[in-house]
Amino acid sequence: MSDAPNIGTRADLRHRLRALLPRPWFADSTPVLDGLLTCLAAPWSWLYDLLQKVRAQTRLATATDSQLDGLSQDYLGPALPRRPQEPDGSFRPRLQREMLRERATRAALLAALTDLTGHTPLIFEPSRPADTGAWGGPLGYGLAGGWGSLALPYQCFVTVFRPTGAGIASTCGWSGPAGWGSGQTHQPAGALQYADLTLLTGEITDAEILATIKAVLPTATIAWTRIASS
């Protein structure tokens, strides 16, 4: 149907109302009648648009704004809040991944931290020969991560690398090519202001990294964690 893209518009609804009237009653061109039918079509067009928006908010794949935050609360409680100024296009895939995330395995820990930081963490289990190597084995001394020990059961050592931040938009650094005191006047420079960590938007905090590890670890296990800058 060629008019399908225009369904729900004022013109479409006016045409539908006009089609219900007996043809002999009116001429082909009736500005007064068209104006009256347009007035009648306007609230129906608004209602149709509202129904489309409401319908979109009932699905995670199409929900937006506060409704997407509400779905996050419904599914995961306070475990996955929206980051400051995070757009729907970034928040939605994070929520979808978290709902179906594997847990309680080494692979789950690796995937969760990689998704969060964009960097592959280092995981070392002192009771796992594939990590420690073995004398005379295919992964011999010097070919694996470190000394093994059976005195640390159900424990691992994790090194997580913080994601590379973008700084604070429109603000110069204290020094550097475009910062304060650099003497560079041939290129645009940002504003000069005192700043703190609260002005960083979209940044992943160390607390979020630790919460992610806790959320995927099996019960009664320990992950000794070191967080390093990438």
Image: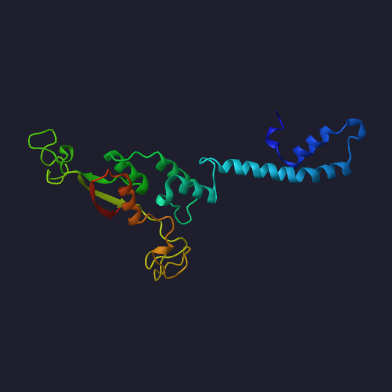
| Residue 20: % across, % down | 82, 33
Instruction: Identify whether 24 is placed above or below 123.
Output: above
Q: Nearer the viewer, residue 30 or 213?
A: 213
Q: In percent of the image, x 38 and y 55: which residue is there?
A: 165
**Residue 81 visible in the snapshot:** yes
Residue 119: x percent and y percent?
32, 47
Residue farthest left in this picture: 136
Indicate the position of residue 123 as horizontal and vertical percent values: 23, 45
Number of disc labels: 0
Most foreground residue, 195 or 81: 81
Observer-nearest of 54 and 19: 54
Q: Residue at image x 34%, y 44%?
A: 112
User: Can residue 162 be seen?
Assistant: no
Answer above or below: position of 86 versus 112: below
In screen coordinates, is 11 left or right of 113?
right
Q: Is residue 172 above or below residue 155?
A: below
Q: Residue at x 88, y 31 (%)?
A: 22
46 left or right of 122?
Answer: right
